[in-house]
Image (cartoon, grey):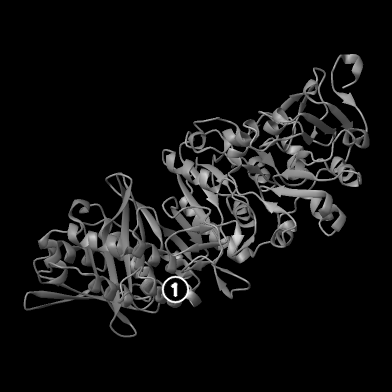
Amino acid sequence: MAKDKGFKGEMVTADEAISTIRNGSRIFIGSGCGEPRHLIHSLVGRRNLQDIMVFQMLAHTLADYLHDQSFLERFSIKLFFVPIAMQQAAFEGKVDYIPIYLSQLPQLFRNKQIGIDTVLIQISPPDSFGIASLGVSVDVTLEAVRNAKTVIAQVNPRMPRTHGDGFLHIDDIDYLVPFEEELISIDQETVDEETAARIAQYVKELVDDGSTLQVGYGHMPYALLRYFDDKNDLGIHTHMISDAFIPLIKQGIITNKQKNFMTDRAVATFCMGSRLAYDYIDNNIQFYFGTADWVNTPGIIGKNDNFISISSALEVDLTGQVCSDSVGRQFFSGTGDQANFIRGANLSKGGFSIIALPSTAKGGQVSRIVANLSAGAGVATLRADVNFVVTEFGIAQLKGKSISQRVIELCQIAHPDFRESLVKDAKKNHYIFPDQLPPLAEDLIFIEGYKSRTHLKNGKTMLVRPLLPSDEIAYRNFFYSLQAETIFLRFFYTVKIFSRKMAQEHWASIDYRRNISLIGIVQSRGNKEIVAIGSYARMDDTWAEVAFVVREDFHNLGIAGYILTELQKIASANGYEGFFATTLAKNKSMLHIFQKFFPDARITAKEGEIEIWMKFPQQQPPIDTAEDS
C-alpha cells in the first residue's frame, strides 16, 4: 500500500479524505456490516458540509444521528432498504426510501440515473500486488465504486478477504484511510422457538437432500436453518450469508457438492453476522461473493436445479399476494430481491418457493393471513408467483390453484382463532362459494403423527396423510377416476355424481379422532394425485366402521393393507377397540384383506352382504402387503 510500491492511491487520514468532498455532493456509502464507520463519523463531523445527498443500501451508523436536527438539515438520506433502527425515521420523513430490486440498482449507477460523486467504502488490506477485497459487502458496492468520481476507502485489517467479484486494485482508489475497528456485528434476533420449530417441521418436509437454498432476509428464515441438521448435501445460492449457515457447513450438511451450477461454492452477495461468520469466510474459497445484478437475477438463479427460495412476509392475503416491506404505510424493510428469487425458483428445474411466516403478530392478536392487505401495504410478490406458504399450522400450496382453493388452503394454515372470520370475509369479497364451510378451528399439529410414507412395488413412494379441506378438488378428481364397478363395490350402489356438497359433508364430519380419512398420494408427471382413501367413522365408544378404496391401476401393490394398518394405529390411539366393516359377498379381495390382518375376525353373511367385526390385537399388526380393491 505504500507509495514506494508504485501504487496510485494516496494514504491520508479520514479528515483529509473527507475534506475533498464538496457541498451538494452525492455520496454512496458501502452497506451492511461493510460500511466504513470511521469514515461516516468523519463525514458527519465535518460541520461545513451542506446539502449532501447520501445513498445507502443497508444503513446502521447513520441511525445514530437521526435525532440531530443539524444533521438532518445538512444531509438527505436515501435508503434502498429500511432497517429496524430507521423505521420510525422513515415514517416521520427523516429519511427517504427508494423501492427497487437490488439486482437493478447497479444499472442505475451505470446509466447515471443515480449519479455518484464520492463513494465511501471499507476494504481489506491489499496484497503484495495491490489487490484488496470489498469483503463482506460486494452486492451493489462494486458498481458504485466503478461509477464514482472519487473513491475513499477505509483499509481495515479486520475486514475478511472474500473470493468472487469483490476484488479492487488500489490504483482504482483515490484515498486510502488506514483504520482498524471491529466490523458491525448483527446479533441473531430471538424468535419464538416453538413457532420456529413447528414452521421448520413443515418447511423441511418440502426440502429434499441435495437442494440448493436461498434464505431470505429476516429473523424467521434464518432461525429455520437451526432445524436442518438432518439434511444432506444442501447447496447455497442466496443474497446474504449469516452466522446461521456456518454450523451447517461445519457439520457437512451444506456441502454445495450437488449443485449443478457453481458447484462446490456457496454463492452470495454480502455477509451480515458476527466475527464467527467473518472469520469463516476470510480467504475461504468455498464462498463466492458476486454482484447483486448477477447473483440475484432470475436467469442466473434458475440455472440451479432443485432451487428452493425460502423467504418471509409480514402479511399474505387470501389470494396469495405477499407484503414484506411495510406494515400498512410504515416502511419496514425493502423490496430486496424476494420476487427475483421466487421467479428464479420457478425457472429452476425442480425448483419452487416457500413463504414462511408465523400465523399471527402482536402476541396473537393479529392474523398475518388476511382477507385484504393492510391499507398502504406494498405487494412485494405477486399472487401468480407464489407457490408454498407455510405457518406453524401447516403448508398451503397455491401454485396453479384458483382463488377459492387458495382461500381454503390459506385459512387452513391460519391461526385457529381467525379461520372462521377469514372465511366470512372471503365470502364478502366473493372469493368463495356462499356455502363454503370453514376449516376446523383447532390446532391440528397432532395429525402430523398420522403422516407416513411407504415404497410401493411399482417403484413409487406413497405419502399417506389425513384428508384436509383443501383436498376437495383432488378428492373429487380421485372419485371420478374410479371405474363404475369399483364405486359400486365401495358404496353398494352406483354413484355417478360426487358434488361439492358431498365432498364438504365428508370432510366436515372429520375431527381426526372419532372420524378420519387417510389419503394415499403419489407423484405423477410432476403432479401429486390421490390414489387411495381409507376412512373410519365412530359407531360407539369402542367400535368404528372402516372402509377404503384404491384406484384400479394401483391394485396389488399393498396399499389397502398399509392404509388399514395406519388407520388401526390411529383408531387404537383414540380409544377404539376394533373395526366393523360391511362388504359385498362378491368382493373377495376385500374380505381377504380383512381376514389376513384380522384372522380372528367375526364374519356373518346377510342378504348378499358380509359383516366383519375385527377386534384389535394387543400388539399392532406388522405392515403387510395384500391385494387391493
Please name whichever residue, 367 or 76, is drawn nearer the observer in this view of the structure: 76
Q: Say which quarter of the image contains residue 223.
A: bottom right
Q: Is residue 85 above or below residue 582?
A: above
Give the SS element for disc 1.
Answer: helix
Q: Residue furthest left?
A: 607
Q: Is residue 67 above or below residue 155?
A: below
Image quarter where the N terminus lies is top right
Which amino acid, mark 1?
Answer: Leu
- Report if residue 466 is visible in the image: no
- Residue at (39%, 66%) from the top-left corner? 407
Residue 56: x and y, percent? 72, 44
Residue 55: x and y, percent? 72, 43
Q: Say which quarter of the image contains residue 12.
A: top right
- Residue at (73%, 47%) from the top-left corner? 273
Q: Is residue 158 above or below residue 497?
A: above
Residue 583: x and y, percent? 15, 71
**Residue underneath mark 1:** 422
Image quarter where the C terminus lies is bottom left
- Report if residue 132 is visible in the image: yes
Residue 423: x and y, percent? 40, 74
- Residue at (46%, 69%) from the top-left corner? 371
Q: Is residue 581 left or right of residue 339?
A: left
Please name whichever residue, 487 or 104, is drawn nearer the observer in this view of the structure: 104
